[in-house]
Image: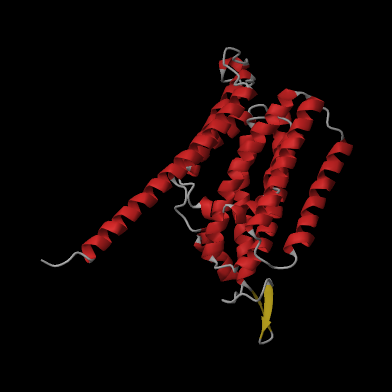
Amino acid sequence: MGVTPLIWIITIAVTIAFFVFEFFAHVRKPHEPTIGESARWSAFYIGLALLFGVGIGVVSGWTYGGEYFAGYLTEKALSIDNLFVFLIIMTGFAVPKKYQQKVLMVGIVIALIMRGAFIAVGAALIENFSWIFYIFGALLLVLAYRQAFAHGESDPANGKFMTFVRRVLPVTEEYNEDKLTVKKDGKRFVTPMLLVIIAIGFIDLVFAVDSIPAIYGLTNEAYIVFTANAFALMGLRQLYFLIGGLLERLVYLAQGLAVILAFIGVKLVFHALHVNELPFINGGEPLLWVPEIPIWFSLLFIAATVAVATIASLRKTRNDDKKKERETFDGEKVIHAPED
């Protein structure tokens, strides 16, 4: 793709500038964003991401453009799953709504830093060890299984990690505006706000483990991996407030993501076999008969899976709501039925 160090520097600088702007323009003064504000900025960042993808396609070719769009769509879907866990954390810690923006902003910045580190490590591994595709593929298949069958079974706010943190740090029970620490009787305590940020940082680390191998299954270009992740995280704060109620209605999101992760896992294993160098597999020779899944098919498959999971989720929750309404209505009829 031919990305120069100057392009990397400009890209990282612009990304940092966007987040600095976000902080000073929207997050610095605590408030709960309106639906209109959230919708406008969400549309702006999604539009910017799509425009950037078109730019990659025009400048570097549509093979790279397709890789970017497939990666962006995958990372956006995984980021929405991230939001669901953020919502659980916010609820578990009872974070006041006007302070949730700051928590989300910090969490998103931590996520970008975590993913940046994983991107660098992943690029180095892929460059030097072709067999890493086997590891990435197997990891994604395991994560796909966990995503499908273990999603939502634990409470991040009260898990083992946070129990350990509470044991180590002196914690107050009350929030003190958006401060991270407070002094009481000459002793320094941390507030629940700091615990929330620690919890989100830990969750970001966990999510980076499936996020980065997933996108490296779609492209080997570290620049595309980074920009797709950066654009997927931009506007995530506004999206949280825009679809906060909708998150709980996406009941099949976990299963949809499991299908995507499993698909990319298989794609990675196929690619690993196609470039095989392991001596105990086919004598160290590539298995050229193994098919390489083209990027256009990957993009269509991922888009279709996200669409099906969303439509099926909304249809199920709508039917569940109608069923509850009927049961409530029937119950009221029984209660108010005249005596014989």
Q: Residue furthest left?
A: 340
Q: How many marks?
A: 0
Residue displayed at 10% across by 66% down: 340
Q: Nearer the viewer, residue 44 or 135?
A: 44
56 over 24 or under it: above or below? above
Q: From this viewpoint, which residue is outermost toward the top? A: 289
Q: Nearer the viewer, residue 286 or 250?
A: 250
- Residue 31 in percent (x, y) is at 68, 67
Residue lying furthest right in this view?
Answer: 6
Locate the N terminus by quadrant: top right
The residue lying at 50 percent from left, 43 percent from top is 253
Residue at the image point whose x is 17% and y is 66% from the top: 338
Q: Nearer the viewer, residue 140 or 9?
A: 9
Horizontal arrangement in the rendering, residue 53 relative to residue 339 (left or right):
right
Residue 106, by quadrant, is bottom right
Point out residue 272 in the picture as x, y percentages from the top left corner.
61, 24
